[in-house]
Amino acid sequence: MPQGATGFEQMYPHIGRWVQSSGWMEMGDDGESSSLLRAFDEGGLVWESQEDDTTLDEVLQTLDAFLAQRIQEYYA
């Protein structure tokens, strides 16, 4: 992450790192899943939000925590 990161990258540093180096995410209705947000790497889907997540911020916080662990395990 660049020194002095602000905004989104400051609030969700692991998502920022993920999309800049390891994978991507999709947000919104894809017509196939009830999840709001999904994260992928070259192997496919690695995480998707639950139906009962109520706010976008809640979903992003959960994804950021998941990616912190995944980055440590697989990409550190």
Image (cartoon, grey):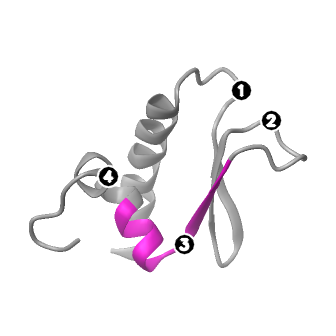
Q: Do the residues labelled 4 and 2 touch (CB within 8 Å)?
A: no
Q: Are marks 2 and 1 in contact (CB under 8 Å)?
A: yes
On screen, 2 above or below 67?
A: below
Name the side, left or right, on which 44 lies relative to 72.
Answer: right
Q: Percent position (x, y) of residue 25?
A: 59, 60
The C terminus lies in which quarter of the figure? Answer: bottom left
What residue is shown at x 63% (from left), y 38% (from top)? 49
Label 2: how many residues lie within 10 Å, few (<14), some (14-19) or many (20+)? some
Q: What stretch is highlighted in magenta?
A: 16-27
Q: Which of marks 3 and 4 is nearer the N terminus?
A: 4
Residue identifier under label 3: 23
Q: Nearer the viewer, mark 3 or mark 4?
A: 4
> Nearest the camera: 8 or 40?
8
The N terminus lies in which quarter of the figure? Answer: bottom left
What residue is shown at x 46% (from left), y 69% (from top)? 19
**Element marked by disc 1:** loop
Looking at the image, the residue that sits furthest to the front is: 7
Residue identifier under label 4: 8
Asked if the stretch drawn in magenta spans residue 23, the answer is: yes
Q: In which quarter of the image is residue 68?
A: bottom left
Label 3: how many residues lie within 10 Å, few (<14), some (14-19) or many (20+)? some
Label 4: how many residues lie within 10 Å, few (<14), some (14-19) or many (20+)? few
Q: In which quarter of the image is residue 21?
A: bottom left
Name the side, left or right, on which 23 lies relative to 5.
Answer: right
Q: Which of marks 3 and 1 is nearer the N terminus?
A: 3
Residue identifier under label 1: 51
Looking at the image, the residue that sits furthest to the right is: 32
**Element marked by disc 4:** helix
Mark 3–mark 2 Cα distance, whole angstroms, equals: 21 Å
Residue identifier under label 2: 34
Type of amino acid under label 3:
Gly
